[in-house]
Image (cartoon, rainbow, N blue to C red):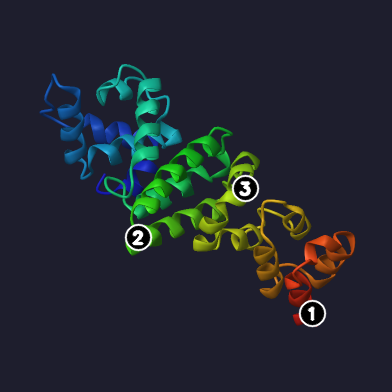
Amino acid sequence: MSSFESLIRASAANVIAEFSALKGIKKGDVDTRREQIAGMVGLNAVQLVCGVGFNAAVNHVLNLARFLGFASTEALVAERNYAFIHDRYRELTINNILEIYAVLGHPESQRPEWADLIISRLNNVEAQLEETINPVLIGSYKLEVRAIYENRLAAPALLDVRLDRQYAVLRDITGESMLLLETGAMTPQAFLERPGLTAEEKSRAVFQRLIPKAVAESYLAAHPAENSDGKLRAAVTELS
């Protein structure tokens, strides 16, 4: 396959042809067998599992899961999910992660369960952010969060988690609250009315002209308490 991108986007016919051509695969230990198969297509085992597992075209290819050492397609999916959730840019590069989101965001691939999977992954990555200040890790994390919104994967279940007030610091790191408006994941009116978003985030959105002045003024008129510190009104005034 030569690349993760080519595997995750390959047609069922191409995947079958690629794996059918492999010779000399060891039998016995499934992990060793999987690593050998991965090496023969230029990947590591985690890339192999996620590349095949997230490729909707090959989900129902008969015997593919068994060829890769899994008892069933369900077992392959379970391993795929575990690898995706727990990898912190080690076996899967940030480019691999971005490619996965691009594939999941395709209209034909959209599924409600992706929200839970993405939430679990972000929680795992964020746990490492709390353990160490690593510019490379932070940079990859920011790219990942942006990809989620740009690929229209911000389902209501995901927003309910990400827009809680306890995530304000992380949203500030990634610019996530602005992404809501930039990508159309939330309307300006819904953004202003979201209780988990801080006054600073709402003011910043107005300053950046992501919220029309008329919408902000209407919101202030209906929610005067929101302007207790004057920040939102100052942002609206700045637009004059």
Q: Residue 159 placed where, x, y %? A: 62, 46
Question: Which residue was labeled with disc 1?
Answer: 237
Q: Which quadrant would residue 228 be assigned to in this image?
A: bottom right
Could you tell me which residue is drawn at 58 percent across and 48 percent down? 162
Q: Nearer the viewer, residue 223 or 20?
A: 223
Looking at the picture, does residue 219 appear above or below residue 116? below
* C-alpha separation, residue under disc 2 versus residue under disc 3: 23 Å
Q: Residue 70 placed where, x, y %? A: 29, 21
Left of 90 or right of it: where is 62?
right
Farthest top residue in view: 71
Q: Residue 18 placed where, x, y %? A: 26, 36
Residue type highlighted by circle 3? Asp
Could you tell me which residue is drawn at 13 percent across and 20 percent down? 27
Task: Identify the mark nearer the N-term, 1 or 3.
Answer: 3
Q: What numbered label is drawn on residue 164?
A: 3
Task: Identify the mark nearer the N-term, 2 or 3.
Answer: 2
User: In the rendered structure, are the residues bearing label 2 and label 3 in contact, judged by CB atoms less than 8 Å apart?
Assistant: no
Q: Nearer the viewer, residue 55 or 221?
A: 221
Circle 3 residues within 10 Å: few <14, some 14–19, many ≥20:
some
Q: Secondary structure at mark 1?
A: helix
Circle 2 residues within 10 Å: few <14, some 14–19, many ≥20:
few
Question: Which residue was labeled with disc 2?
Answer: 133
Where the C terminus falls, by quadrant? Answer: bottom right
Q: Secondary structure at mark 2?
A: loop
